[in-house]
Amino acid sequence: MHFSETFSRMLLYTAAIVSLACVMAVFAFLVYFAWPVLAGGEWKDLLSLNWRPFQGHYGILPMILGSMYLTVLAMLVACPLAAGVCLFCSGLGPGPAAGAVKALVRFMSGIPTVVYGFVAAFTLVPFLRSHFSGSTGYCLLAAGLILGFLILPTIVLIGLSALERVDQELSLTCSALGLSRVQSLIHVIFPAAWPGLLAAVLLGFARAVGDTLIALMLAGNAPQLPGSLFDSIRTLTAHIALVVATDSQSQAYRSVFAAGCLLFFIAAAVNITVFRVQQKFGGLSRDG
Amino acid sequence: MFRRIFFVFLCLCTAVFSLQPVWAGSSDLSAFDGLSGRLTIAGGTAHIPVMKQAARQIMEHNPDIAITVAGGGSGVGVQKVGAGLVDIGNTGRALSEKERDKFGLKSYAFAVDGVGLAVHPDNPVNNLSKDQVKGIFAGEIGSWKQVGGADRQINLYTRDEASGTRSVFWKKALDKGPVAVEANVIQSNGAMKVAISRDPDAIGYLSIGHMDDSVSGVAIDGVSPTRENAKEGSYPVVRKLYMNTKGEPGKLARTFIDYLQGPRGAHIVSENGFIPAGQ
């Protein structure tokens, strides 16, 4: 008995240490390779708007902005939809329909990203091209819409579980106060579940920043500042995917590590925020 | 009866094996007899059809050999073979001095390929001057009307920074001239064909071996991007396709390279729209 407890504890510690060590190793690796760029004063060149590797310009600012625009657009698509779906599934909609929608969202979360990208490349892209002059169809809007759909299940499923947790504690109280289901959802449960909902949104955000394939397949990958929703853009992730295959001795190649570092920091920042929010407010709703 | 057939078969096998040293240099499929193991190939996307066909023939002939073919682009080919992750790394360009020195790579050319300009089949433009091509890719010529087409915007498609196809097109068709930043960047020859075939206003460039009826080739200064023109030398935008190994290739890799450089390989190369390197 005692032995098995020690054993399982050791197993868990090992698992934790291995995963932590992996993350630290990735970070160390990124910093090690990005260091010549950061220390050598090349970072000034990296923070320019000009990516013309064959003319000696290695600015990744367009990609940083491209990632930002695309992520914000995807969030603008996904958040209102997710809020609606969450409310619908947790009481606003009729039971069977709510169940069906929930099942559909679960199913959506299992669809491989490449399928979204592929279908959109053959439907949405030609549609945008023929209906908006001046656009090739491969653009910020196409990638933003699809990326919004891609992160929707993440936000909805995490948000729903947060709502359900709060709902279990408060629904009796709400009924006792004479609130209807709709009233209690909108005025009590939704506001009380905000830390969980924020975590859902942040994790959706992290998924959107980190996604590579949608941007690579639909955004056009032109390293420029987008002037409109119909312009071709390149994200940091797509940039890494496109440039990682170049001559590894070139300066263009080194920009990949700077981009990797940035993405790592964004992911770390989001996760730390989620953790802090959960730590600070997560317990509050449980205590009532 | 069965036993007799088996005996004859055994005799034949023995005969084949004993003859093998004589045939070893002939680059026939029989060179793979008695070999076994895995051969991994990655890199240039233009190479893929040829590699796949050769791999299929070899694996059908000798099921003890497993050959995997992956893409990734010329840059990936160099890095993977350099790091020892694959046996053969394909490139659609000659290696840079640095790459060769750093990894100790050896190159084997097996085919010549042209890189041709292509537009949507509905586009009436089928000939451009070199200056027009440069103007279009630099973003100075923005409408098909300026080069004799419809009054529509030109949608530019280019390849990624690691592409050997881009490298040769940029050097030999654009004379290292600028490519507009608005151009969409596509990451393989196959994806380029799909992009052009689905966009009526597109212009892009791809390996001649990949061109088919879904896109329409555009002549530069009157010379069409066809296999015949590339072969006789009148079409200037050509490059060699290479297989690269780290140091001396192993037995299986060596046999594979010999096979592709030999007569059977040349046949596969031609069937896929490329020109065998020897010719």
Image (tube, coloured by chain):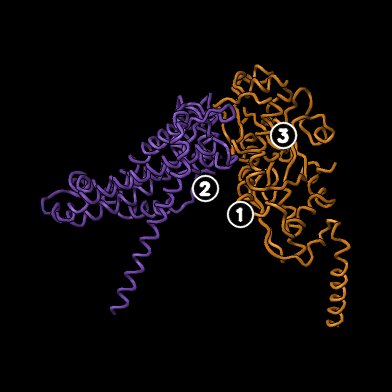
Chain colours: A purple, B orange
Residue at image coords 26%, 51%:
A91
Query: Residue B131 lies in what quarter of the image?
Result: top right
Label 1 vs label 2, nearer the camera: 1
Q: Which of the two residues, A55 or B55, is positioned nearer the viewer here?
A: A55
Could you tell me how far apart the alpha carbons at marks 1 and 3 are, in whole angstroms? 29 Å
Q: Find residue A122 and report its horizontal and vertical position in percent.
A: 56, 40
Q: Which of the two residues, A266 or B58, is positioned nearer the viewer here?
A: A266
Q: Which residue is mark 3?
A: B115
Q: Chain of mark 3?
A: B
Dot 2 alpha-carbon crowd within 10 angstroms: few under 14, some 14 to 19, many 20 or more: few
Tags 3 and 2 touching, CB below 8 Å:
no
**In the rendered view, does A34 fall on the left or right side of B239?**
left
Residue B263 drawn above or below residue A123: below
Residue B14 drawn above or below residue A26: below
Q: Amino acid at mark 3?
A: Val
Q: Amino acid at mark 1?
A: Leu
Q: Which residue is mark 1?
A: B85
**N-terminal label among 1 and 3:** 1
Q: Could one spot residue A85 in this view of the protein?
A: no
Q: Find residue B139 and report its horizontal and vertical position in percent.
A: 59, 21
Label 3 vs label 2, nearer the camera: 3
Dot 1 alpha-carbon crowd within 10 angstroms: few under 14, some 14 to 19, many 20 or more: some
Q: Find residue A26 and report its horizontal and vertical position in percent.
A: 44, 50
**In the rendered view, does A148 fall on the left or right side of B104?**
left
Q: Chain of mark 2?
A: A
Are callouts 3 and 2 both on one chain? no
Q: Which labelled disc corresponds to residue A115?
A: 2
Residue A16 drawn above or below residue A241: below
Could you tell me how far apart the alpha carbons at marks 3 and 2 are, in whole angstroms? 30 Å
**In the rendered view, does B223 fall on the left or right side of A262?**
right
